[in-house]
Image (cartoon, rainbow, N blue to C red):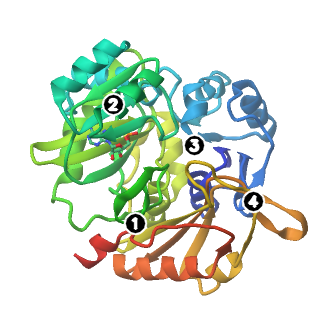
């Protein structure tokens, strides 16, 4: 099977790594890819938001499956274009990806499907926003309605700051604050059958102890030893299946990866947000534990045959990923610096380095090319061992001004 992956971050590197280990995959391509992906796939310079360009490339390559990684091409309808050309594609239509593309749409779907989530108001004026903030009280949660690459949400006890964020967006969703630990649960679906993966937790804040600004994610781990037994079954029954059914009944069938960001609050499990694609960096740890070859699973989603798939097989151990970000991330990341020690980090085989924002320099050098630069990932018998291996690998890498959190999975590993 020839497979084409769209995207160029660590999530796509994780997807490409798993696909490259699947004996069913005879050729692996990625567009646009990055310097790390280029080691396991043939990379192609393509505008990933251009459905015609992506379809054209898939046709030329004779791809039997196209996997769309990031949200922006999905919302732009890239999967629709590929599907219209008769090529199986993993990823929802642009209409179904509105589940991520519009927080207001997601709230509407959840209300119709009876899915538990924070109570909320959609606001377009300053007066509406002020009224909604006062209805819920502090801490305030203000979300840009549209795609904002992880930067659209402000959680603050400062009413002025909450109002200012609302004023800077065209339309916002203001909702009640959810307390309790967060869980990311991914499910693969073909629009009818829903197959949950293993839960993971990510770390959104830039600094140790969950301090500093929100980021795209600074690390992740799986499994969650502290999570209540039966969590996955509960979320399948109360969140994932009703959402997939509601979208199908609306005529906007959702196939691909449904990501539920959950808060385990004192009053029960609540949805914080939906995403329409694999999460980054949780994918890095979830796929590190998946034993079932990946291509067949993604193809079954694309072809609508998930009900015929054998149960997924998982590694009993744990996985931890630590993100190495560039100096200044997230506000003003500096790029173009050489990265050293990549081979050394992988030398003993206990960890692997997934590239996020990198590009090839001269003489085989690898240069930083984004805010999040690398996802250093390791598996182990338990979280403590996986953590130790991931951090040992991080220590062998040097990037001028590079930053990483030192407490990824710490609490869970020592609990
Ligand atoms: P989102 O982009 O919706 O995932 O939001 C980013 C982060 O903001 C989440 O991971 C949460 O930590 C936080 N957040 C979002 N919504 C809420 C809420 N209703 N209550 C508390 N925290 C929230």
Name the residue: 28% across, 51% down. 182
Badge 1 crowding class, 10 Å Cα cut-off, few under 14, some 14 to 19, many 20 or more, is some
Dot 2 or dot 3, earlier in sequence: 3
Label 1 residue SS: helix
Badge 2 crowding class, 10 Å Cα cut-off, few under 14, some 14 to 19, many 20 or more, is few
Judged by depth in the image, the label closer to the viewer, 1 or 3, is 1
The Cα atoms of the two marked residues, 2 and 3, are separated by 37 Å
Which corner quadrant holds the C terminus? Answer: bottom left
Dot 1 or dot 3, earlier in sequence: 3
Dot 2 or dot 1, earlier in sequence: 2
Judged by depth in the image, the label closer to the viewer, 4 or 2, is 2
Q: Does the residue labelled 1 lie within 8 Å of ligand 1?
A: no
Residue 388 image point, x, y percent: 44, 82
Q: Identify the residue under disc 3.
A: 69
Label 4 residue SS: loop
Task: For the residues labelled 4 and 2, say whether their Cβ atoms are less than 8 Å apart.
Answer: no
Whether residue 119 is visible: yes
Residue 292 image point, x, y percent: 46, 60
Q: Is mark 4 within 8 Å of ligand 1?
A: no
Whether residue 113 is visible: no
Q: Identify the residue under disc 1.
A: 208
Question: What is the quadrant of residue 88 in the picture?
Answer: top right
Question: Would residue 347 be found to the left or right of residue 359 on screen?
Answer: left
Question: What is the quadrant of residue 224 in the picture?
Answer: bottom left
Q: Which mark is residue 160?
A: 2
Dot 3 or dot 4, earlier in sequence: 4
Q: Identify the residue under disc 4.
A: 35
Task: For the residues labelled 3 and 4, say whether their Cβ atoms are less than 8 Å apart.
Answer: no
Task: For the residues labelled 2 and 1, say whether their Cβ atoms are less than 8 Å apart.
Answer: no
Name the residue: 27% across, 20% down. 130
């Amino acid at each position: 099977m020839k497979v084409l992956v769209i995207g160029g971050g660590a999530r796509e590197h994780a997807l490409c790594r798993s696909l490259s280990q699947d004996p069913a995959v005879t050729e692996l391509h990625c567009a646009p890819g990055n310097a790390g992906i280029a080691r396991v796939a043939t990379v192609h310079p393509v505008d990933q938001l251009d459905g015609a360009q992506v379809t054209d490339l898939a046709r030329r390559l004779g791809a039997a499956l196209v996997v769309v990684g990031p949200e922006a091409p999905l919302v732009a309808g890239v999967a629709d274009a590929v599907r219209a050309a008769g090529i199986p594609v993993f990823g929802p239509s642009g209409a179904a990806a509105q589940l991520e593309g519009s927080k207001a749409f997601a709230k509407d779907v959840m209300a119709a499907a009876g899915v538990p989530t924070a109570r909320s108001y959609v606001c377009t004026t300053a007066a509406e926003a002020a009224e909604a903030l006062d209805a819920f009280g502090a801490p305030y949660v203000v979300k840009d309605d549209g795609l904002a690459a992880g930067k659209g949400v402000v959680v603050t006890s400062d009413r002025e700051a909450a109002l200012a964020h609302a004023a800077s967006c065209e339309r916002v969703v203001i909702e009640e604050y959810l307390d309790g630990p967060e869980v990311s649960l991914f499910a693969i679906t073909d629009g009818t059958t829903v197959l949950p993966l293993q839960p993971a937790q990510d770390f959104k804040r830039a600094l140790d102890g969950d301090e500093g600004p929100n980021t795209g994610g600074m690390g992740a781990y799986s499994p969650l030893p502290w999570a209540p037994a039966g969590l996955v079954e509960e979320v399948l029954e109360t969140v994932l299946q009703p959402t997939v059914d509601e979208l199908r009944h609306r005529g906007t069938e959702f196939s691909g990866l449904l990501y539920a960001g959950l808060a385990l609050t004192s009053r029960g499990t609540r949805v914080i947000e939906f995403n329409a694609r694999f999460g980054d960096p949780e994918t890095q740890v979830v796929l590190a534990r998946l034993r079932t070859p990946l291509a067949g699973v993604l193809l079954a989603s694309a072809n609508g045959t998930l009900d015929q798939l054998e149960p997924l097989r998982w590694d009993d151990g744990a996985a931890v990923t630590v993100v190495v970000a560039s100096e200044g991330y997230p506000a003003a990341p500096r790029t173009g610096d050489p990265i050293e020690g990549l081979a050394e980090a992988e030398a003993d085989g206990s960890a692997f380095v997934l590239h996020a924002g990198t590009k090839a320099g001269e003489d085989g050098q690898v240069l930083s090319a984004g805010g999040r630069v690398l996802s250093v990932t390791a598996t182990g018998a338990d979280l403590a061992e996986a953590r130790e291996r991931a951090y040992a690998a991080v220590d062998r890498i040097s990037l001028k001004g590079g930053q990483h959190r030192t407490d990824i999975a710490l609490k869970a590993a020592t609990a």
